[in-house]
Image (spheres, rainbow, N blue to C red):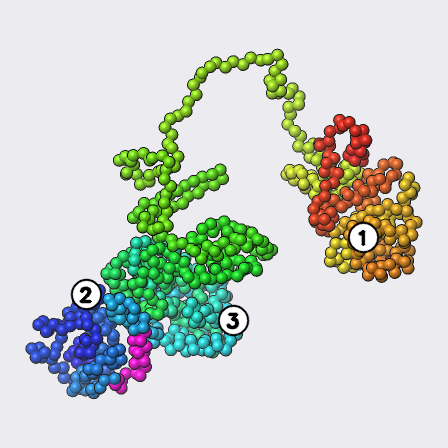
Amino acid sequence: METGYDFILGTPWSRRFCSTEADWATNTFVLKTKCGQTSRVPFIGTAATPRPDPPPPDPSVPTPSPSITVTSPRQFAHFIRQDDVTFFMVNVTDLLHYDPPCPNAELIPLEPHSPSISMPLISTFVPPPSVESTLPSCADADAEELARYTANLEPTVRDLIREYHDVFPSSFSYAGIPPMRDVEHSIQLVPDYRVHHQAPYRLSIPKAAELKRQLEELMGVGFIKPSNSPWGAPVLFARKADGTLRLCIDYRNLNPYTVKNSYPMPCSDELFDRLAGNRFFTKIDLRSGYHQIRVAAVGQLKTAFRSRFGHYEFTVMSFGLTNAPATFQRAMNDIFRDILEQYVLVYLDDILVYSRTLEEHLRYLCDFLDRLCRHGFYAKLSKCRFAQHNVDFSGHYVSDQGLHMDDAKITAIAEWPAPTSAKQLRSFLGLTSYYSNFIRGYTRYSYVLTSTVLWKNPPWAWTPLHKDAFLAPKKAVICAPVLHLPDFDRPFILITDASDFAVGAVLSQVFPSSPDSFHPRIPRFPSPTPTTASRLTPTRPATDEPSIDYSPTIVEDATVKSRSGDCPIAFYSRQLQPAEINYTADERELRVRAVAEFHDQAAAVHMGFHKTLAHVSRLYVWLKRKDFVKDYVAECPTCQEVNSVNHLPYGLLQPLPIPEGRWQSISMDFIGPLRPPTPRGHDAILVVVDHFTKRARFVPCRYAISAREVVDIVFDRVVRDHGLPLSIISDRDPRFTSRFWRRLHEVYNTQLHFSSSYHPQTDGQTEITNRTLGDILRKIVRDDQQWDLHLAHAEIAYNHAVSPATGMSPYYCDLGYHPRVPADFLRPSQLHPDTSCPALDDWVAHMTSST
């Protein structure tokens, strides 16, 4: 549109922005920015410089429709620096709604007689008909938000923020879809990817309403669009710090197939190190920062998501994509690359501007906001803090005094309830480990707690030691110190120390102005006077121990001669023995002797491979010990001669119910009659076995005893030590089926279970025990046939051996420990035969004799 004017400014506009003035002497318009820049623009409108007439319209050329660009004062200052600008119009409706309003604001026609545009005069507060009715409401919202959040700022800072108010829109309605930039979010998939789509998650009624509202808002600004993509991820919400809900997409089916972006992310500890000595801080939080980055056109199909309100895909970067943080960090670094870590720190959408003085801060902040404006990024004014001495950044409070813990995190740690599972404990350790620098001795406490969750599915145990280690960090954070930031203009002090098992070091600095600063220990000895060479050395060692001034020496003060005595006992005791006994030990012979101690002796009773290996492994260790013991037992002549055939009987076997506790279910059986009887009249053995612990009791008796005598034996040997059982399994022996036996156990509420006739496999546990007992007695009983003398040793050996069913010995399963047994003390390597007690010699010989 040809008007003859480059731009038109009204008096209310100039009054509102006091940084503008007219220089009538030079017929120029002077525009001053907060950055200290001055721009002069020639203007038309005085009598000395008449306004040029517009060129006459050409009837053969169609008149184009008027194209009006609405601009703000800040954008106007940017546009006038361009050479190819021909026309702009100031948004006068914004001037009509400033607080306080401008009463003299008016809209004048650009050319009263121009056929291309005609605008009548309007009065105050009346918008032109061509302007949408939504603009005043947006302007009102921006002006109100700007006034509310800048009221308590310094005047110079407030004026700067209001100058760049277009960087802080109340919504994306002004901005729309982000502009094209060099950085776009791309989604590259691995070759063997699979397309995934998933049904939407169910949402509550309030969340569904919030989802519908956010979808309409995103559609309105062009951040999403309807999709026909084969991909489809469900929607979920994440709660923000201010309590509102953030729309997130569950891309867990897409992210595993995405090629990961290895762009480096900043380390918060390194960022904090740059802040020492600074007093003014400005924190900028971008408004939905991810949504200000475009998604590449080829990747938009992969961002599709499904909801109850339709199938959509993103045109901007959404929350939940695996490479989104790397893409956003790269975009921020590209914009602020030349000023990073000079006066700007960037951690994703949290940006910090810092300086030592307020003048520097205004200059830095102006440069920073100008970059945001030029690249089309927008910030959220309500979450920004300008020119403050204390701001929150990356989970900490940064101030001119140092680094503080976040008050919200202190409250969360202090009020954390005692964990009841490993998952809750991991969450507590994850939170406290981030603030471990503020907790003195945190490593000691975390070591106790970490040992509980090292394994994937650890058994939960919470002891008083864990409780103390859990409460100590909670008490420490309540009085957490303020950490000084390292000042690289000051010297560092490295304090080292060592012990017999560890070396430690602490890096410190001296801050005289702080009352709780570190004071180095005063050396007990004065340090040497510094020389020129020591002043040039970057590191100067110091110690609290005296320097070595001399080398100790030993002066020969006498001649020492050795004279042998009449009976040099010490000399002879140190002589080598004759050569015939100085030989290398035969390992195989020692191994044979070790295995024989736990297999061939009468107290060991020639147990099988597994039980013998368990005994040997308690005291001896060598390579391939298992194979050696297995071969030894397999080659034992006694075992090969008397061992019974060990295989399951043919047919279907139905196991008995597993007992719930010790000595609640027992089995009983008689072995006998054994001929001839022993001198003590015993010709049978009553075998009682506990089904839970596999412990057995062997009682010598007469085979012809009555049911009453059986009850006496059971009460004397079993009930007295273990209590009444809940059930008894036995065969159909007349003594176990008698009326007395049945009525007695009805009184004691003990259930009786009988095996099938001619089917001993019903009580297989007792049958196996009977067979093992018979093998043991055949191996240890001599020609005198006094087997009842060896029955106690057989019971000890049986219960001390490892049971294949439980993986532990019956003694340990029943008692909870390994009792001391004669085999532990009667090994030949520990015996001294020269005793003065013959009876003891006979007993030891009887117990250690091999069969």
Which residue is under mark 1? 719
**Amino acid type for the residue under numbered disc 3:** Gln
Residue 198 is tagged as 3
* Outermost residue toward the front in this view: 515
Residue appearing at x 37%, y 59% in the figure? 397
Horizontal relation, residue 207 to residue 457: left or right: left
| Quarter-of-image position of residue 57 | bottom left
Could you tell me which secondary element the residue under label 2 belongs to? Answer: loop
| Quarter-of-image position of residue 638 | top right
Marks 3 and 1 sit apart, C-alpha to C-alpha, by: 64 Å
**Amino acid type for the residue under numbered disc 2:** Gln
Horizontal relation, residue 636 to residue 501: left or right: right
Q: Earlier in the sequence, mark 1 or mark 2?
A: 2
Q: Position of residue 80 (x, y in %)?
A: 19, 71
**Is residue 674 shown in magenta?**
no
Task: Report the magenta stretch's main SS.
Answer: helix
* Outermost residue toward the left in this view: 48
Q: Which is in the foreground here, disc 1 or disc 2?
A: 1
Could you classify mark 3 by the number of other residues whose Cα lies within 10 Å: few (under 14), some (14-19), or many (20 or more)? few
Which residue is under mark 2? 37
Front-most of 483 and 617? Answer: 483
Q: Position of residue 826 (x, y in %)?
A: 74, 35
Could you tell me which secondary element the residue under label 3 belongs to? Answer: loop
Q: Position of residue 610 (x, y in %)?
A: 72, 44
Q: Which residues are magenta?
A: 126-145
Residue appearing at x 49%, y 37% in the figure? 500
| Quarter-of-image position of residue 51 | bottom left
